[in-house]
Amino acid sequence: MNCARCLLRLQSLGIVVPSVRAAVRYQLATAPSRITPHDTCSQALRPFHGSTVHCQRQAVPADQEEKDKSLVTYDDLFERVSRETKTKAAFSRVLDVFCNRDIRRRGHVEFIYAALKKMPEFGVERDLTVYNKLLDVFPKEVFVPRNFIQRMYNHYPRQQECGVQLLEQMENYGIMPNMETKVLIVQIFGEKSHPMRKFQRIMYWFPKFKNLNPFPVPQQLPEDPVDLARLSLGRIANDLDAKVTVYQTPCTDTTESGEEVTYPLLVGIQSPGQMEQLAGHNPERPVFVEGPFPLWLRKTCVYYYTLRADPLPPGQKVEDRYDPERSFYYPLQLDLDLDRDLGDDDSFDVEDVDEGPVFAMCMTSQGDQATLNHWISSLQETNPILGCVPTLFRLEAGPMELQGVSDPGHGYGPEGEEETETDLVVEEEEHRVSQSGKQ
């Protein structure tokens, strides 16, 4: 024991003593029964040299690199199976390949995350059967807690987070789980788990908000530009009696000189109340064509234009008297003499902003002034006062196309016009330079 301590002290000082080392080896060989566990640990101590840079480089990123490699591998698996077409059958085939490859489902968490990311590309992000099949990838009865301690300390947290992420994606797309989803969650995580609580919250709130909107937007928007414009204008209009008129459909015509002319789409809407209000408009005050204004229908953005006028000055406003017999059950005006105290405050904190009347709206696939002028000319057939009222155009610089109707390569709108003008300027400069070179 003393020899070992001396040996360690001398080694720490950098002194090499072969005789002491030989004595220690002889003592260990001749008297093995005297060696205690403490002596063995003392003799086993040897200096270990390591680089701090090497430790910092391989301490944490090893798992991250392995995870990234697994994600890339599963992404390649989806791309390999779906080289021709990305359909529901191809996505299901990828799930079957993964489930049949390994009975223990190694790497199922990374695979499920990669599958959730690829679902919109395959068009199965709203398919409940695909979500249940993806939930079936988890191993069964492995992550179920056996006692209250495991439930309290979040048994298998990584797998439970993955299950909650799958249910959250279903919630984001408005997919309500069914009984098969519940059975799978019970088999995988048990009754007392975070995915089960998420499932219960979805089943509680989704039926309450499912039919809350009285005017829901359809899941599949119409592909026909005329039908899409009808749907959009019908949602903007405040009157159910408003009439949608198709002034012009997108078509291509050939002139006498052989030149092809493309006519844009032009659809408008106007209600009888707006026609009556426009007929009583003062001809000395101008009307304005403004736009484009965006309107979002799910993931599709369309643009519309309005025909409106500025609000009247406060001195020229005339309040219309309501007919008390117009609506017997719901009167529009009540004149009640109630006893009020001097401390009562009759004013309201709501900001009342008068934006002026809106007489008509339209949608077009080419929002230039010529197309909108054709819309105003068509409105004169039912609104003759427009022939006497000056019309001003307030068109903003921005997208003026009905998305999904016209090809973005046509160059409609102010962007295409600016490109054309710059091309003409460049050609004129090149011609001027060439003429000066010739001289």
Image (spheres, rainbow, N blue to C red):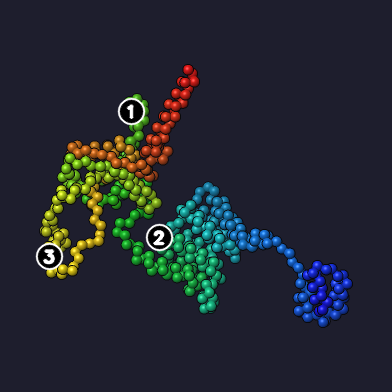
Decide if residue 301 is on the left or right side of residue 46: left
Q: Which mark is residue 37?
A: none
Looking at the image, is mark 3 or mark 2 earlier in the sequence?
2
Q: Residue furthest top?
A: 439
- x%, y% of residue 32? 83, 79
Q: x, y (%) of residue 334?
A: 14, 62
Give the residue pinned by disc 2: 174
Q: Residues within 10 Å of mark 1 (few under 14, many from 20)?
A: few
Separation of disc 3 and disc 2 at Cα? 48 Å
Label 3 sits on a secondary structure element that is: loop
Residue 422 locus on image (x, y percent): 42, 32
Cα separation, mark 2 vs mark 1, equals: 51 Å
At horizontal 29% and vertical 41% (from top left) the residue drawn is 394
User: What element does badge 2 sit on?
Assistant: loop
Mark count: 3
Q: Residue furthest front?
A: 13
* Horizontal and vertical percent position of residue 341: 15, 69
Mark 3 or 1: in front is: 3
Q: Which image quadrant for residue 61?
A: bottom right
Report the residue at 81% width, 71% height from top.
10
Q: Please rate how many residues cluster around mark 3, counting C-alpha atoms within 10 Å: few if below 14, some from 14 to 19, many from 20.
A: few
Residue at numbered disc 3: 336
Asked if residue 55 can be seen in this view, the reply is: yes
Image mark for residue 255: 1
Q: Residue at x 16, y 59 (%)?
A: 332
- Quarter occupied by residue 203: bottom left
Which one is in front, 176 or 19?
19
Q: Amino acid at mark 1?
A: Thr
The answer to which of 85 and 300 lies nearer the viewer is 300
Q: Are marks 3 and 2 in contact (CB under 8 Å)?
A: no
Using the numbered discs, state the Cα–Cα distance from disc 3 to disc 1 in whole angstroms: 69 Å
